[in-house]
Amino acid sequence: MPTCGWNGKLMMGGCGGACGNYVVDRVDPALVRGQAVVTTDMGHQGSGWMWAWNNLEAQRVPTDFEGIVAGAPVWSQTGNHPFFTHWGERVNIGNDGRTILDAAKLPMIHDAVLAACDARDGLRDGIPQDPRQCDWNPQSIRCAAGVVRRIYEGARNSKGDLLYAGMARGSEDQWAGIWISGGGQPVLLLGGPGFIANSLTAYMTFMRDGGPGYSVFRDFDYDRDPPWLALIEGFFSPRQHDLRPFKAAGGKMLLWTGWNDNNIPPAAAIDYYETTTRTMGGTPETRDFFRMFLLPAVNHCSGGLAGSEVDWIGVLEDWVERGSAPDAVLHHHPVAPVAMLAAGSSHDPGTSYMVYGRHPLAPGSFDRVRPATY
């Protein structure tokens, strides 16, 4: 451990997505506060597959940490990729093999949603505070209404049974390059996230690998395959809802996700939190150690019109060390002088504060701030 300049605290920064790299930017804010920090590449370099590491800690090793921040978590790898990531592409492919909805139409659809729902929070600013209050019907746009509706509704089998959550209304400006492309070519063929769904489904979600010839477009069946996925789900997805050991150890956990997350549907995280609440015996029994926050107009992990930067370390310290549980958190939209941009960075202000310096929440470093609740 450090011999000087250490405040006695240790922060472990888990890696996200496929892991395979050291996420130094995630531990840097703790380092400058005098904390010792540790991060990991999970034992490999390059692309591969991992999950919501922090959530597994709370579930399987509940005494490791006093406080955990779990951001943009994948609660189900088998659900998120063949169901969520692939579903949006599958429903946008016509009988001729070309896309139905073109990315050029997305701004028009997004504008229609905002026109109907933006002001419901009392402020017309292009940022719906809670998309659950929006019931805009895509039928009003006529163009590819069926595709839009099915992306909202989420993956379903032929009986109409829900298999996994869909996207929130107001997130349409984040669909391009994820499920919706231009020029009629499916995103999978262009190397988009559908490629991730194809790789993971072929090599990780079945007891027997599909191999290099497997095609999630051609081979995955929404009626036949879900029961097979369930056989391996427990090995690498943090699906436990009974967090009594973590609570008994005195642990506190903050879960957050962005309403515009285009890699992980926010409704899936909400479902996990609400199921955990029921499992733990109700809202009071859950909120005294586990709270969730939904950040309006925030994208996957970072970025977005409203700004994604929250002083999660400060919020967690207040709760763990001083017993001050958060009812809301403030998320900031950062700005920075061009001179502070990382070399070669093409980031636009508001994308991720990590490229702008080590003290992003200092006065003058942000131009908007909003509260976020559950």
Image (cartoon, rainbow, N blue to C red):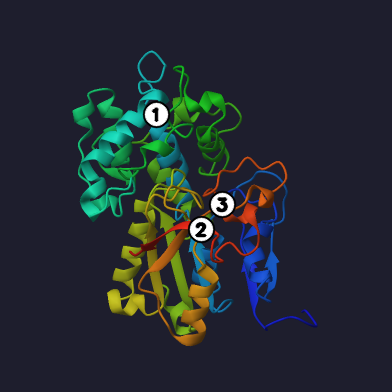
Q: Position of residue 76 (x, y in %)?
A: 45, 52
Residue under numbered circle 1: 90
Separation (CA) of disc 2 from disc 1 = 39 Å
Decide which of 309, 256 is in the foreground and name it: 309
Q: Which residue is mark 3?
A: 352
- Residue in the picture at 41% in, 17% down: 98
45 left or right of 228 in image: right
Q: Quadrant of the C terminus?
A: bottom left
CB contact under 8 Å: marks 2 and 1: no
Q: Which residue is mark 2?
A: 366
Q: Quadrant of residue 25?
A: bottom right
Identity of the residue drawn at 56% across and 73% down = 61
Q: Secondary structure at mark 3?
A: loop
Q: Secondary structure at mark 1?
A: helix
For marks 3 and 2, the one nearer the N-term is 3
Outermost residue to the bottom: 322
Residue 240 visible in this rendered orientation of the protein: no
The answer to whether residue 99 is above or below residue 81 is above
Q: Amino acid at mark 2?
A: Phe
Ranked by sequence position, the earlier of labels 2 and 1 is 1
- The Cα–Cα distance between marks 3 and 1, rounded to whole angstroms, is 31 Å
Residue 209 x %, y %? 57, 38
Does 59 sit above or below residue 236? below
Which mark is on residue 204?
A: none
